[in-house]
Image (spheres, coloured by chain):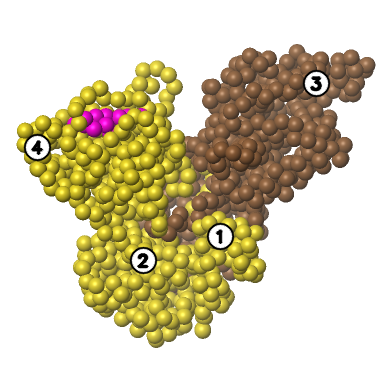
Chain colours: A yellow, B brown
Amino acid sequence: MSTSTQQNSKAAHLSFALAQMNTNVGAIEQNKQTILSFARRAHDRGARVVVFPEMTLSGYPIEDLAFRATFRTAAEQAAEDIARSLQEEGCGDLFVVLGTVGTAHMERVEEGGAHDDRPTNTLLVLHEGQILHTYDKQFLPNYGVFDEFRIFTPGHDTLTMEVDGYRLGFAICEDIWQDDGPAAQLASADLDVLVTINGSPFEEGKESVREQLCQRRASEVGAPVIYVNQVGGQDDLVFDGSSFVVDASGEVVARLKAFEEDLRVWTLGADGATVGATVRSSADGSDGSDGAFVLASDPLAPVLDADEKVYTACVLGLKDYMRKNGFKGVVLGLSGGIDSALVAAMAADAVGGENVWGVSMPSMYSSDGSKDDASDLAERLGAHYDIQPIEPLFAAFQNQLALTGVAEENLQARMRGVIVMAYSNAHGLLAVATGNKSELACGYSTIYGDAVGGYAPIKDLLKTRVWQLARWRNARAGLGGELLGRPVSSVPPIPENSITKAPSAELRPGQKDSDSLPEYALLDAVLEAYIEKAHGRADLLADGFDEATVDTVMRLVDRAEWKRRQYPLGPKVTALAFGRDRRLPVTNAFRE
Amino acid sequence: MSTSTQQNSKAAHLSFALAQMNTNVGAIEQNKQTILSFARRAHDRGARVVVFPEMTLSGYPIEDLAFRATFRTAAEQAAEDIARSLQEEGCGDLFVVLGTVGTAHMERVEEGGAHDDRPTNTLLVLHEGQILHTYDKQFLPNYGVFDEFRIFTPGHDTLTMEVDGYRLGFAICEDIWQDDGPAAQLASADLDVLVTINGSPFEEGKESVREQLCQRRASEVGAPVIYVNQVGGQDDLVFDGSSFVVDASGEVVARLKAFEEDLRVWTLGADGATVGATVRSSADGSDGSDGAFVLASDPLAPVLDADEKVYTACVLGLKDYMRKNGFKGVVLGLSGGIDSALVAAMAADAVGGENVWGVSMPSMYSSDGSKDDASDLAERLGAHYDIQPIEPLFAAFQNQLALTGVAEENLQARMRGVIVMAYSNAHGLLAVATGNKSELACGYSTIYGDAVGGYAPIKDLLKTRVWQLARWRNARAGLGGELLGRPVSSVPPIPENSITKAPSAELRPGQKDSDSLPEYALLDAVLEAYIEKAHGRADLLADGFDEATVDTVMRLVDRAEWKRRQYPLGPKVTALAFGRDRRLPVTNAFRE
């Protein structure tokens, strides 16, 4: 255990700033500037300690960037720069808790012993121009979306530190999800507060799981737990922020915004209670303070409702994917159906309708209603709108190929894919795919056709949820205000007809989705059990679904799963196909 | 340490059969039957011990199949079936060493304690109708193509066992790559032989690395090392087999074929030397034998030359991908260029020319020579050959879209992609992409155009290697014999003109690859240093490459890397996007 030896008498209060920052993977210089700006604000507001999310300087998750020595060196340099800059600006008295990629153990190893080329996932405490302390994450998640055993080596020591007589303990994300982690290790360390820095991706319902977890840890250490989470989209993850503090009794005493950057102050009193109002400390400094105004804790940010969270997560994912990869506009096919309508509305909420190009690509099977709905949608959004009939293109191909059946249906979808990519190439737009989770899971989609695109904003929404969010978004139009900083127009974006009509791919006369798939209410219930809950066949029957439906859905899903993974593949023969460290984030600003 | 207590006097010799098997991921019943067939052959040949590769019953690598309880149960049942079947057939005296997914620790845990849902990577010894011993892999690779920390929990004990007075130690693959693995743990265990079962993917030059490694381990344990590796293609890995035995002095005393199933016998004498010829053991059985003929060790299989290895690896990868996924034929575009010619030759070697559909798709910029070369190639291979001009299709699109520049070039490539997929859909053929590693690394390829396909046989071959293998394959035609069991025709498959002409995408008049890329000899040298050796910018300059070339190549590669990863993405919002165990092998025969 590493412990600072300082033993001050306890001040009357200790103020923390929770700095909920949107980091950018690989953009070390940009992250450094953002950190400095948050730290200055924290100092200006009188905070004694500012706490950032996990891997603040490097961004998170960094995948195989961890193996680049140039990247690690740049991060190390940037941490020293931050400490020095704050000191030079007169903010050196602030304790800055941030995350970065750590290499200290590598230097030790290089002096002799086996070589481990994996860095650590590290927390730094900066103070008075120096790196005062380091703590290395002990528990590395390697399940689900996490691959931390691949890229990090674990730490083995706890860290505690005193500030103004308050004893602080530290943990990084997965550390607190394990029962034998720092909370247990520090249970008898007489902590005044457990500070945790996190990169915890959004999932529906996860905020309350996090709060319950921290309530348990608070009870174990007998002190409040500070939970700072990152915010922002990174590839196919969305971090919701939603940082908070629970006190020793389990009460939530601080809460930050969801899906936006935020900085809030929370002040702990010597009795372990939250200081909830501005008070003047003793003027003679006998309580260890300097006699200035004591910082009140900021009010709690509101909690969003369930649909607002999911809708906002999708918008933020797309918005940050575009911003961090340098895209200014999107192009998508507008069929008049609900999926493309919802995606277009999300895109307009992300980057403004003027940056959305909607292309209607009617075939001989498209109804007039569909074309009207597409045009109506574009008008409501203020989006660019083009009509590109696919009939002449389809006819040219059929003149040569004379396809029938599914091959003929796929050909129509591929004509549309080529057009969308032509707009993308000609105007530098991000092509977005409009497939929802129900149809993607069942393979009710054409590869290189409607599946074309660089980002699929609703790939994780079941069809029934698509309808629900469309209704929510239209209702939201009446409430005004802002959505991720953009004013919400009073016009409901999605034509009512797109919501109410029966879904159809319109690839043959009179086609309906229900010709090929179970009704969506039933399908989505089976998909949720089979995919989300990993129920096997026996479990699904026990869930009460009928055998024919279960077998149909399992066959569709397994086949689609396989198709989704088919490309691009080929043997590795001369070495690892694209090098040993080429498993990199898509959104990655690092340049050698 | 688990050790059998039996202490026999040492027999004069002990015969091992090395069973180099081509397993099929998820096809437990099929793997079981193949194991039984190999075991019977081993028994018929008088072997006392038969050794299979890693994860024989389950196939390897199984990725998230590891989490399916139904899969684990099926594998467990199959292991018991094998032991019982062999016993019933009178082969119960054989010791069968095979690999499977292990769950013994889970039953222990379920009786109390924390739940770990990860199985073990396990070696079983079957004998007299029972599972006699188990050994769990201790060192789990989690780098490069391996993700074993995600799916397995490590073992903690060594295993030794006596057979006819010989002491055997055991290890699984990564175990012997670690200096503190079983070889070190068993250094003073007085082993007579160290048996290792492996799933080691082919890389150029890796066979000699493996042999050198086993020579070190043989020296550590003071005994021969048996190295049995799996053979066959599995998704984008190719396992070469190339199993072998090194004796205590480091000499290679047994060697199996590369890229084919094989079973060979190796017999160890009581003095630790290899029994190299058929000899009669003492008739009275005083040496512990039964007085029968002693098995001679089989002769060593020949070593292939470097080009033959790489060519065969590509063919086997494609052949097994098709066989294991149920594809009978392939379709590809034939441009007359070297890449499509080599891929077509590989496809014909994999499944026969009669199962190859070549489509020539000339544009207004295609030279007559290109069309002739494509037709010549198809004739040499006995492949189906169609001509589908793209000009009318391109004209129909341009009539609506009027594209220019790169968008116009991409449009041509996408017309071809649509045609290839039309053949694929209409005839149930696997679309193969013909891109080589140089052009894919530099992004000199059109997404949804020439990149279309379910498998890319030469994605890991640099362009200079493509030419080299084409020359090798043409020369090979003169030598007769077989390639992966298929007779080699005397006709050189690849038109000389496809090898010698300057490479061009033929997407605009007079276009040459060298307009956009450095000359291939230089480009490939930089790519090898940047991608394979992970040299950074400073390293590349120190390698002697000029700054302009280095910056061009780095910019191209980084951009292409990013483009390759763009699709399909989207936020995870309701839970893990496709469930917690949906990271599955493409080639996966398991059904619930």
Mark 1 belongs to chain? A
Number of the front mark, 4 or 1: 4
Counting residues from the N terminus, which is met first, the one under dot 4 or under dot 1?
Answer: 4
Tell me where residue A182 sits by quadrant. top left
Mark 3 belongs to chain? B
| Badge 2 and badge 4 in a common chain | yes
Q: As shown in the figure, which amino acid type bears the numbered disc 2?
A: Asp
From the image, tell me which residue sits under label 3: B164
Counting residues from the N terminus, which is met first, the one under dot 2 or under dot 1?
Answer: 2
| Residue A574 in view, yes or no | no
Q: As shown in the figure, which amino acid type bears the numbered disc 3?
A: Asp
Numbered tag placed on residue A530 in the rendering: 1
Numbered tag placed on residue A282 in the rendering: 4
Mark 2 belongs to chain? A
Q: Is residue A162 magenta?
A: yes
- Cα separation, mark 2 vs mark 1, equals 23 Å
The span shown in magenta is A158-168
- The one nearer the camera, B576 or B376, is B576
Which secondary structure lies at badge 4?
Answer: loop
| Badge 3 and badge 2 in a common chain | no
At horizontal 48% and vertical 36% (from top left) the residue drawn is B143
Tell me, yes or no, whether the two marked residues, 2 and 4, touch with CB atoms within 8 Å. no
Q: Residues within 10 Å of mark 1 (few under 14, many from 20)?
A: many
Which secondary structure lies at badge 3?
Answer: loop
Q: As shown in the figure, which amino acid type bears the numbered disc 4?
A: Ser
